[in-house]
Image (tube, coloured by chain):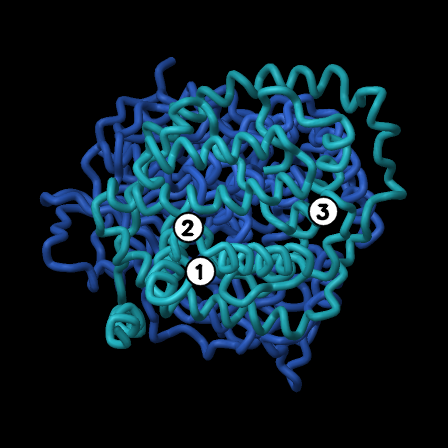
Amino acid sequence: MRVLRLAPLLLALALAGCATGEFSMRTLPPDTPAADNAAAVKQALAQRQALTQAHGAPATLPPDVGPPLTAAEVPSLATYDPWERVNRFTYRFNARFDQWVFLPVADTYRRLPAPVRGGVHNFFGNLSEVVSTLNYGAQLRLGPGGRSLGRFVINSTLGIGGLFDVATLWHIPAAPTGFGQTLARWGVHPGPYFVMPLLGPSSARDGFGWVTDFGTNYAINILNLYRGTAGWALTPLNAVDIRSNTSFRYYSTGSPFEYDTVRFLLVRKTLIQDDALRLWQRRGDPPGGAPAGE
Amino acid sequence: MHAPEQVTDACRASPSGCRRARALAVFGGTALLLALAHAAAAADPDPPTGLADPAALRATVYGTPPQDIAPLPQTVPLQEIDIRLPWARPLPKVLWFDARLRCWFSAQDKPAPLAIVIAGTGSDGNTAKLALLRAVLYADGYHVLTMPSPTFPGFIAAASSTGVAGDLVQDSQDLYHAAAAIIAHLPKRVRITDVDILGYSLGGAHAAVVKALDAKEGTLRIRRAVMINPPVSLFDSMRRLDRLFTRSIGDGAQGLDALYRRVYVRLANYFRAADQVRIEDANLMAAAGAVLRTDQDFQAAVALTFRIALVNVFYAGDLYAGTGVVTDPAHPPQPGDSTDAVVQKLFGMTFDDYFERVFLPYYLAHKGGATRESLLAESRLQVIGDTLRASPDYYVLTNSDDLILDPQELQWLRTTFVGRIKVYDHGGHLGNLGERDQMEDLRRMLAGQWAGDAP
């Protein structure tokens, strides 16, 4: 068992060796230009309408959400980052871990047939519905909570233990949530910028939320998947599944100011999302619409 | 720019959630930066300080409408190449991640010509515009190698022999040698019959100079070069952009702060007012539409995009040249240091500042016989004007409303590339890249079958 556990690491190191020489080639998933452009054409149609509206009547707020945001309420251009030195260190650590371990393993994983990887992806997605359901409950948002629960039931049964995402085919798309959003729902500010080890840029609140969700899974321990041998095998597989489906590359900007750029974007995104979420919640989740914010 | 964990949360659930999360992540708090992403892909647009054409400005920022794009193949294989180049200067600690040059390669499985494609100002070797050209060229039977601009920080650190970007000939030389090194390392199964080179925006100018250098050195025996929306005078274009920044954003920190607040307010209210709670790519574009309204907004997006590219070039140049404008040569910056102060300083720096305080001191000291005038002259396409005029193998695709050309410059292109230039009526700067007609003209030019501009 111990050897098995080490196998991915050894494989990663062996593969990483290839990347230290003066020349290396790494196969990426192929581009799919025709499909991408077809999707863009579809969006352009929707966009044309939306753009007309946006230009015609900018920011007319429904009466129940209060006055619009004013320039005075905009958070400062400088970002609150009291843990900057540690954060920068973690960012660099993550970049190196990504380069030496995560990416080589994810590259190897992508050689598996697509249906297998799809099954793995759906399986973990299905498990995450448990935490989503609980958190929607804690957010007192019963509609989306019911959808998450419904998805879990449908996919666990008809989807054969979650390997197939039947619910999405039935137009019940996933809308995961977590404890970070639950905290946001009850007015907790994101707090300082926080770069999580291995997981990447976040905020103190959302980082704490992630840990709580992980702990919740561990406590519930559904089908005994989160503890013991199964836990040792599944957690890395989950991580590899996530990594191989994420296109983010550390330092793809090549810029010495990448840390600043990511921090700027992420913090503003979180604040604007929180702001919109707060108002949407005051108005309630729309019937049949996907829950807000995800 | 995506934050990985935001994306991954939703990726766990479904591909559509994944897309949405990515959209949100890209969204990143300001649609200004979304618009900037578009403009960044547009590279170095350069509206004159006069009245810029509103349609050209919008085309420049939004790019080619997807329904007008040439037919594209279903899949294009892709490999990432990392190469360490021996002539690179010692790597500063703060650029530790830029040790190797990164390019992208798509191989045919049969003998085929190779197309080398160069990105525009400040861009890496895998922009959306490069991907578009890659798809078209790959479908047309080329191996395709896409390379970053010599003004991309990753190139400056890993492939520049000076570390001080902006010299058209020197940068092209480094680019040429890097391309040759990559081709020499390609596996044997990749069989190359001919080499062609093209580039968009500043990359177009680089492509032409690389071919001109190759005509002397003969390593690659480059057959043809096509320049898409190239500048004619690099430095003049950049100076105009500085004036555009002052006009549309204002000077230094105050102007930037005001722009930031304006954009943030529009964006936050857009999302407060949105009926649909689901944020998808289409809404994202609409959000960008809510943020960019007036000509001044579009000009600001273009000017700021350029300033962001300059920030990187300036910082790296100052570091390598040891000119001490924003970095202290006696105490080189460390990777853990906060960069807030230096970023703020850099956003207030113009291209003239870069030229006078970093570029000029470095090149006067390191290039034998160089003068201010000679360096300025070498930043113009005229430096290879005789070759461009005489050789039948250089082509130009541009637009009559391209923001980076003034009328004299466009006229110079017309008279230099007689019978080898196509000027479209509309598109601004790169706002028609990938259009059916343009890609058909590109194909014919690369194949040496272009019959000339229809009257």
Viewer-side residue, A219 vs B129: A219
Q: Which mark is residue B171?
A: 1
Q: Residues within 10 Å of mark 3 (few under 14, many from 20)?
A: many
Q: Earlier in the sequence, mark 2 or mark 1?
A: 1
Q: Chain of mark 3?
A: A
Secondary structure beneath dot 1 equals helix
Q: Which mark is residue B206?
A: 2
Kindly give the residue lying farthest to the bottom in the view shown: B330
State the residue position of label 3. Answer: A184
Mark 2 and mark 3 residues within 8 Å of each other at the beta carbon? no
At label 1, which amino acid type do we have?
Answer: Asp
Mark 2 and mark 1 residues within 8 Å of each other at the beta carbon? yes
Q: Position of residue B276 (x, y in %)?
A: 64, 23
- Cα separation between marks 1 and 3: 50 Å
Q: Which chain is cyan?
A: A
Q: Position of residue A84 (x, y in %)?
A: 68, 70
User: Is B209 situated above or below B346?
Assistant: above
Horizontal side of residue A223 vs B381, given as left or right? left
Secondary structure beneath dot 2 equals helix
